[in-house]
């Protein structure tokens, strides 16, 4: 059964990893997709291959750390689609360093991509959702935003900030039928975790009851669930193999 027919879904950072898995899964479920990333070649390839499989996918080259590009992207989306049903803010970066050695630009880049771009995009796209009295915003945070991680003060601040942002926005827009939720992945097999060496991975596994890293497709399943859930808002769904239990 196709669960997203006639739904328009925007996914940021869908050229790789979790965003790509969400795009593939949602496309199989019949969604019309608008995806973005900085890598135009890869974006075009993905749009083409999903379209060949019967999907309807448009790629936008956007650097989300540039506020003008985010504004242009939001404007273009509103020209290209009469309604956006689901917005998935997935793009994210890390620039890890101990606090005392962290450069200003490593702090700014992570906050700009992981948090500020989401403020700009939501601010631009919320009005039509409110008018339509429906819409789902799904923000990809991280377990690091819940429990912290040494060497990731910038990343943890961006992801914890995103949780506060999402809960506040959920309270603002719930009365008009718009939901805002977060998914907090644990450690998922993507380029972002490829940098971990075997010793680091083995140490991590000791804290994961399900004793393995997650698959990007497992985050895509959670995103599909939240994109269909009408009575859930302001929540953080951890998909982490049991790493963080509240
Ligand atoms: N992997 C994990 O274990 C894990 C755990 C918790 C949370 N997360 C979160 O899940 C999300 C996806 O992570 P991932 O592991 O799939 O990462 P990834 O494999 O590194 O992919 C990151 C995606 O974000 C896009 N992106 C990065 N910088 C961008 C920018 N300035 N403008 C536009 N797009 C940009 C990339 O596109 P281009 O290459 O085209 O720029 C790419 O598609 C992130 O928010 C991450 O923080 C991941």
Image (cartoon, rainbow, N blue to C red):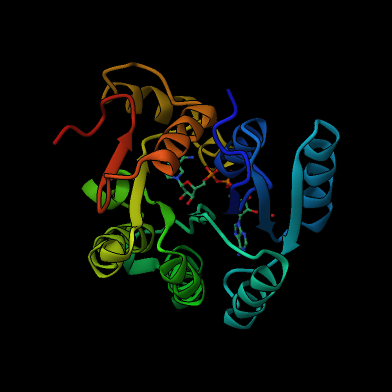
Query: Which residue appears farthest toward the front when viewing the image?
Result: 132
Query: Which residue appears farthest toward the bottom when viewing the image?
Result: 68
| Image coords of residue 107 (percent x, y) | 42, 71
| Left or right of residue 65: residue 230 | left
Query: Which residue appears farthest toward the left when viewing the image?
Result: 246
Q: Is residue 87 above or below residue 245?
A: below
Which of the image's four quarters has the N terminus?
A: top right
- Work out whether residue 94 or residue 87 is closer to the camera in this orientation and state it: 87
* Residue at horizontal 48 percent and vertical 76 percent from the top: 120
| Image coords of residue 26 (percent x, y) | 60, 37
* Residue at horizontal 44 percent and vertical 43 percent from the top: 227
- Work out whether residue 123 or residue 99 is closer to the camera in this orientation and state it: 123
| Left or right of residue 21: residue 106 | left
Query: In which quarter of the view is residue 39 placed?
Result: bottom right
Looking at the image, how many numbered discs can be counted on the residues? 0
| Image coords of residue 207 (percent x, y) | 26, 26
* Residue at horizontal 29 percent and vertical 23 percent from the top: 208
- Work out whether residue 64 or residue 82 is closer to the camera in this orientation and state it: 82
Q: Is residue 18 above or below residue 197?
A: below
- Work out whether residue 126 or residue 186 is closer to the camera in this orientation and state it: 126
Q: Is residue 113 above or below residue 184?
A: below
| Image coords of residue 246 (percent x, y) | 13, 36
């Amino acid at each position: 059964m196709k669960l997203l027919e006639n739904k328009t879904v925007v996914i940021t950072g869908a050229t790789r990893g979790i965003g790509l898995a969400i795009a593939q899964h949602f496309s199989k479920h019949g969604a019309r997709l608008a995806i973005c990333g900085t890598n135009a070649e890869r974006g075009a390839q993905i749009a083409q291959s999903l379209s060949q499989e019967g999907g309807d996918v448009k790629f936008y080259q956007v650097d989300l750390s540039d506020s003008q590009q985010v504004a242009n992207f939001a404007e273009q989306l509103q020209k290209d689609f009469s309604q956006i049903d689901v917005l998935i803010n997935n793009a994210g970066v890390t620039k890890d360093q101990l606090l005392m050695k962290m450069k200003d630009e490593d702090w700014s880049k992570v906050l700009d991509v992981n948090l500020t771009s989401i403020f700009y995009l939501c601010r631009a796209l919320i009005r039509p959702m409110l008018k339509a009295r429906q819409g789902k915003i799904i923000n990809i945070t991280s377990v690091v935003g819940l429990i912290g991680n040494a060497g990731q003060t910038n990343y943890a601040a961006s992801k914890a900030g995103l949780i506060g942002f999402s809960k506040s926005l959920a309270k603002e827009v719930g009365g008009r039928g718009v939901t805002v939720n977060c998914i907090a992945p644990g450690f998922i097999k993507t380029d972002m975790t490829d940098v971990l060496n075997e010793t680091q991975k083995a140490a991590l596994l000791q804290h994961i009851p399900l004793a393995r890293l997650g698959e990007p497709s497992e985050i895509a399943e959670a995103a599909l669930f939240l994109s269909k859930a009408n009575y859930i808002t302001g929540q953080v769904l951890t998909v982490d193999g049991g790493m963080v239990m509240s």
